Image (tube, grey):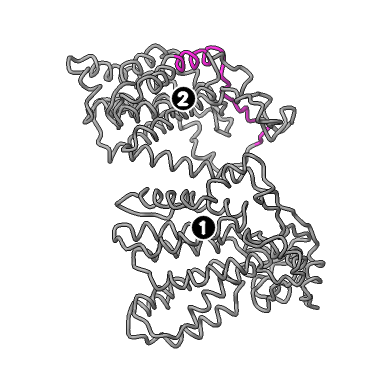
Amino acid sequence: MIREKITDFLTYACWPSKVRKLVTGLVRAIIMGDPVETLKYLLPKTCESINKIMNDPEGNALLTDHKGDKELTWYLVLFSELVRVRGDALMIYKEMIISVFHQCIQIIHKGSYKAVASAAKHLLKSLTHIYMINTRLTVENIDGPFIDFLPIRAWGQPVDVDKVQVQFHIPNDDELYFVREFVETFLYVELDLLKEKSSKLSNGERLRSLTIVHHIAIGCFRIVSRIGSPNVQNLVPTVVPYSAQSQAQYSMYFKEPKFRENLRWRLLINIGKLLDMLVDNQSDDVSSIKMAHKYATKGIAAICRLQKPPRIYVEKSFDELLHENKKQSSTVIMRDECNPGDRNDNFWVTIDGYKPPETQTEWEQMCFLDKTFHGYYTWPKVIKYPMNKRARYTQNDMPEQVAIIYNRFIDKNFIIQSTKLMISDENTDEIMFIYVRFTMFKCLFRNFGLAFVDNFMEQLYVLIHEKTHEKQEGSHRVAAEIVAGMIRGSKYWTLEMVSRNVSFSTILTSFDHEYERSLDELWKKLKPFLTEVCLNLSSATLRHWNTCFKCVMEHGDPRRMYRLIDFIRTLINNQISSNTFNETSRWSFIQTLKMFQWRIPSIWCTIYEHAKELLDHSFKPVREHIAE
């Protein structure tokens, strides 16, 4: 009776989008409890309802109706949740599932084709992935009456793992044959459509096709072999060796189905040609270009991360570090004890008394600890930290693959065009700081040092002086992302890394380091810029610069960030009278220093003394910011 009520509740009601997420969560929970019985009662009725709507005389009109049908959309969403169950339970419904995809995969309504795409992804993952079927850690019979055993009584109880018989779903030949049949039936059709008729498709039709291709690829790539190319040498398929005892002895390609061709290579070629066509012939397709730009940003960040030179780590004992920092005390705590707070043995990791190193050797040997918990409670016996020494690519010394990115960003016109596109790549409802783009800029400045600084600094001033009201917030947001990436990317710069504008003859004749050192040169350009930013803030742009400072300070040693802290100290000491907004903006920036927590005691004392003088400030917003 309960099963019938739940079935009627799900299959005879058309749930609106606001309630849909809650109901699908209920379906997911029911499926996890008993997938076989759930499919037996829900999947046939759901497929029957979909077929009934599509076989109706007006069903063909739904394929091209952008408004869609609410009832059909709900059944497709329900269908996509039902095919999440384990693969072997789906095999008996193979023909029924294929029939639904044949009828609905061409629907142009966005909500409907997204549900179909999700169903394809869930189906292929269920058939190809390895996962636990039974995750219960109890050996009792949970299907019996509650009088004999109440499952909730077993929660939190210890279990002998040797007695737990964990069962895994491992794809069999029938499931992999189903995957091959599904992919060849639906994926190749969409790829051929994009290849042959892409220029004739509307934006909505093209987006539908790409969404289907994307979700099918995500679902089946687990069993598609990697691309074999002479350009990729010694590719390691997995970090854990196949012969290791700590992993299941099963290769993801152990039972690889034989597709017509390597799907990864086919997608690479087809989608690459499609992008070229869109750029050349569909310049008015703004949404597609924005999406391509978003993925290009992620791609550059990922490639730069792969190309970054390795860090050099050093391991030293705690006593050795204390001796080097000349802060050893007769009251050093025992390592087994936990004494939180300021102590003689953790004073050296604070900014108080810190003197910047004068030579490159001193800079390299300086122990910077980025995590705030280091030394606050106790110390480990051995501390591992990265040296402040990292190789950097130069114009005359970089691999061919690295030079591709270098040649783009060294071009001023490319940077100008890119920043313009970043400004326009906005959701008009809410403009947010984009962390992926910040990561991309961080990777660029980390890998190439000062090479791009001059070009970006020139563009930064253009961004913060944008006069068009509609573009001001977006311009400041892009500038904040660039500055955050610039400061964060300079984390491991060497003191004597030379700007690309300094000639080699100057280096040879400047034994006393008369040429500007990289970090000093960077901050000579950043300080006046940040000062000008503070004078051109608005209520809309303030939050982006707050996020910029937080990204820079997060997990950073204040001694390494002393230049930024010194700039914010100038805001504290600035006694020039200003309006209420400028005063609250200064205190908003000062609040970002809380990322350093206990490691800037002298700065907190300075802030405290200055705050006492403003406690009776005549404006309430200023008093509230001080209180925070």
Whether residue 532 is visible to the viewer of this picture, yes or no, is yes
* Residue in view at x 38 percent, y 36 percent: 25
Q: Position of residue 577 (x, y in %)?
A: 39, 85
Q: Main secondary structure of the magenta part?
A: helix
Q: Which amino acid type is marked by label 2?
A: Asn
Q: Camera-side residue: 62 or 291?
A: 291
Considering only vertical position in the picture, is 468 above or below 234? below
Q: Camera-side residue: 164 or 44?
A: 44
Label drawn at residue 270: 2
Q: Earlier in the sequence, mark 2 or mark 1?
A: 2
- On screen, residue 459 versus residue 5, left or right, reads right
Residue beneath disc 1: 455
Q: Position of residue 398 (x, y in %)?
A: 67, 45
Q: Which amino acid type is marked by label 1?
A: Asn
Span colored in magenta: 160-184
Question: Disc 1 on helix, strand or loop?
Answer: helix
Quarter location, residue 232: top right
Q: Camera-side residue: 502 or 37?
A: 502
